[in-house]
Image (cartoon, grey):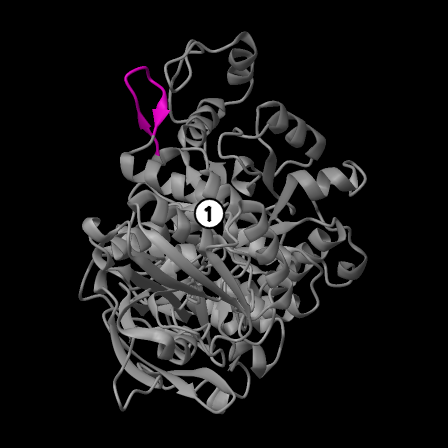
Amino acid sequence: MPLGDNLGDKIDSRYCGVETEFNDDMPHVLSHNLNGGFDFVVAPLMEPRYRPSLINSATRDSSVLPFAASDLVLSPSQWSGHVVGKISSWIDLDSEDDVLREDSEITLKQELAWASHLSLQACLLPTPKGKSCGNYARCVNQILQNLNNMQLWLRIPLDKSDDDDAAAGSSDGMLVDPTDSWELWNSFHVLCERHSQLSIAVDVLSSLPSVNSLARWFGEPVKAAFVHTDSFLTNARGYPCLSRHHQKLLSLFFYYSIQIVLSGNAMHQHSGGTTPSGDKLTDNHAQHAQKHGLRAYLEYVSYLYQKMEPLSEQEQFEIGYRDFLQSPLQPLMDNLEAQTYETFEKDSVKYIQYQRAVSKALVDRISDENASTQTVVLMVVGAGRGPLVRASLQAAEETGRKLKVYAVEKNPNAVVTLHSLVKLEGWENIVTIISGDMRSWDAPEKADILVSELLGSFGDNELSPECLDGAQRFLKPDGISIPSSYTSFIQPVTTSKLYNDVKLHNDLLHFETAYVVKLHRLAKLSPTQSVFNFTHPNYSPNKSNQRYKKLRFEIPKETGSTIVHGFAGYFDAILYKEVHLGIEPTTATPNMFSWFPIFFPLRSPVYVKAGSPLDFHIWRCCGNTKVWYEWCVTSPTTSPVHNSNGRSYWVGL
């Protein structure tokens, strides 16, 4: 029974599971827990007392393994849809005891083979024991090479010591810092070549690490969170509840589609009279509460889920784009399609900001006394299907200024729509449509105001500098450019999802491409820093649109060690004076969806030790026919320079 429907989308975290003990009556285990309100069980597959070495060697090959049940006792859909296999917790593949190590390796392979036979969607691997996980990871990696679509969840306690003197860990994947469970996961992950079918199931304990330390996990492939009953407090009515820190953490799990699994025995005495929110229980709820010992805990998790704010209209629009890699648009080289225009035109916030900017520019350009006698010449360069023309004319009406508009557009298909719009609105005497490239058009007169929307996710990545440099020749010396300036920003991120998606292509080209993506499952490791700035008009005699920036990012020591998979890029633009729009996280224009961030991947993820700096270099390079970016890391390790000479990714002039 899903936790609720309040979020507006069908995320996986709507489904809550429960960890069970070994039981050879799987139909009873499943029916008892599903009837109790849970959606799936995490159940042991093998009798816990089984050891291969205890079986007589002469009969070992013919023995029947003590699995929980035959594959026939449940239907294939029940096994696949409601059971997560739990690998025996006693196994220790890095034990110094040779017999235990060999038993562990044999059992791991047997249980995962059985889970694969049952077509389970996931199996829970026990937490590595001790400081070394090399042999455990080697065996898991061998299995991953030939595994079907099943996910392996490595169980990791959500733990990090705040002791500044703790060992810092090792990036070689063998010895790990015992005070930081992220180090344990990272070592195992590296040894398994960061395989996309290896994920994490975190154990949520009664004490939690710092907020900074927790944040880095959301860029990792966390699939489930085991919340232990001893992590719960008791409210005034005797019901289980969680601390504010735990509540906030569960809200993040819900947001990032991480499934909750309740674990442990009931620790609270409670009546069947009320729910955790204080409402009366229905007879049906009370009946389930009596049947299942963890029902009160499930009710509380459901209560937290339903307390979450519903997704906004913008978030609902963006759901389908979350963590989906898209190649940036090339509107100068390619003609956009009608569907692309339509999507951008729906962003009313953007055009409201443009209208505000034009209104202020008109008022500054023409005084109230001259408003009825003087006409402002305004040119929209890259007019598309006309939304900026409309915004400019609305600004003129709002301010009582007279306007003459030139709409310049190179896409002949969009020009058809422009002509239709002008005729429909009766703008024939106000708007002149120019079908051609702004860089080669000879304007019949100079403009007072030049308006464009050539900005990309990184500000300059759709060649706004080159286009506006070419167009400013028909702007009056004291003319106004809207936008007047824009700045790009960048920050390091952990995003295992995007890294694996790029890695799937198995080539250099995709690791040297910058992508537009609605970032979702990621950890932002350091505040953004500004990169490139462009101002318009630019009358400098030695102007160049080539740029280079070196940035040093300081990752807080309390965060702990991290992995950098790449860099997220944003922009902020000043349209006119105080009117701005942008997507830089700290100043982002609310409810605007025209731009998603840009993502610059790294060919090899960079391990950054706790408290160490990260040095990043980025270049904007210009040639005769293209513009491209190159980027690299030089500290704490050195990466290759990505996209040298624009060999993989460029924007065509």
- In the image, residue 155 sits, relative to residue 621, either above or below, namely above
How many numbered tags mark residues here? 1
* Three-letter amino acid code of the residue under disc 1: Tyr
Asked whether residue 539 is in view, the answer is yes
Task: Name the residue located 57 percent from the left edge and 25 percent from the top edge.
Answer: 37
Q: Position of residue 233 (x, y in %)?
A: 31, 29
The rendered magenta stretch, by its main secondary structure, is classed as: loop
Occupied quadrant, residue 510: bottom right
Q: Nearer the viewer, residue 390 or 333?
A: 390
Occupied quadrant, residue 379: bottom left
- Which image quarter holds the N terminus? top right
Task: Name the residue located 35 percent from the left edge and 84 percent from the top edge.
Answer: 545
Instruction: Tell me the magenta residue range.
Output: 232-241
Q: Position of residue 633 (x, y in %)?
A: 36, 82
SS at badge 1? loop
Local crowd size for mark 1, using a 10 Å CA cut-off: few (<14), some (14–19), many (≥20): some
Q: Is residue 449 left or right of residue 387?
A: left
Q: Residue furthest front?
A: 373
Q: Position of residue 589 (x, y in %)?
A: 33, 51
Q: Is residue 536 left or right of residue 415?
A: left
Q: Nearer the viewer, residue 591 or 72?
A: 591
Q: Which residue is mark 1?
A: 256
Q: Is residue 490 left or right of residue 650?
A: left
Q: Nearer the viewer, residue 327 or 551?
A: 327
Occupied quadrant, residue 381: bottom left
Asked whether residue 133 is in view, the answer is no
Q: Nearer the viewer, residue 478 or 306?
A: 478
In the rendered image, residue 327 lying in the magenta stretch gets the answer no
Q: Position of residue 463 (x, y in %)?
A: 44, 75
